[in-house]
């Protein structure tokens, strides 16, 4: 029989614990966000250095529109210090863009899949390609 009592956590202790558990809002607590409403990506060659997403690709498929998904993602990434460097494509066929931050480049591709579905590919490389 165990004589241990559960420890009650105060709201301040819970807040501190949650702050220590995460270091970023995005994929695996990094500054590379997941597209709104999408989770469970397919990972390809992901390499991390601590909580820094150094290189690799994450691929999502989910409900959405190409233009809204693309614009929403770019706007969200700006809030984390990523700077848009280029953009191209057509909403009906797909959009792609390049963002840079510190020594990393993020390539974003949003393309239509099936009705009301999009495929989002996020590829990060080390070294800010120009």
Image (tube, rainbow, N blue to C red):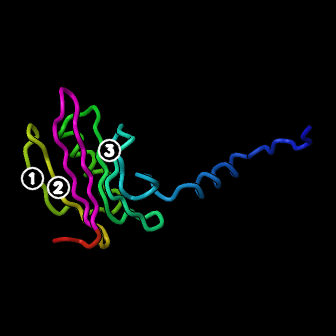
| Residue 97 numbered tag | 2
Residue 63 spot, x, y in % from top left:
27, 31
Find out whether the residues at labels 3 and 2 contact each other: C-beta distance under 8 Å.
no
| Quadrant of res 94 | top left
Categorize mark 1 by other alpha carbons within 10 Å: few (<14), some (14-19), many (20+).
few
In which image quadrant can residue 127 be found?
Answer: bottom left
Label 2: element kind: strand
- The answer for how far apart the CA atoms under marks 1 and 3 are is 19 Å
Lower sequence index among marks 3 and 2: 3
Q: Main secondary structure of the magenta part?
A: strand
Around disc 3, counting alpha carbons within 10 Å, would you say few (fewer than 14), some (14 to 19), or many (20 or more)? many
Lateral position of residue 8 relative to residue 111, left or right: right
Task: State the residue position of label 3.
Answer: 35
Residue drawn at point x = 42 percent, y = 58 percent: 30
The part of the chain drawn in magenta is 105-125
On screen, 116 above or below 74?
above
Left or right position of 92 against 108: left
């Amino acid at each position: 029989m165990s004589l241990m009592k559960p420890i009650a956590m105060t709201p301040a202790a819970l807040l501190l614990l949650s702050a220590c558990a995460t270091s970023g809002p995005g994929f695996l607590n990094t500054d590379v966000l997941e597209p709104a409403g999408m989770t469970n990506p397919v990972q390809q060659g992901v390499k991390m250095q601590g909580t820094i997403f150094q290189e690799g690709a994450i691929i999502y498929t989910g409900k959405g529109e190409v233009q809204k998904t693309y614009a929403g993602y770019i706007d969200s990434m700006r809030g984390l210090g990523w700077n848009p460097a280029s953009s191209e494509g057509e909403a009906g066929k797909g959009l792609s863009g390049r963002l840079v931050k510190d020594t990393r480049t993020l390539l974003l591709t949003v393309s239509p899949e099936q009705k009301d579905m999009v495929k989002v590919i996020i590829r990060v490389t080390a070294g800010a390609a120009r």
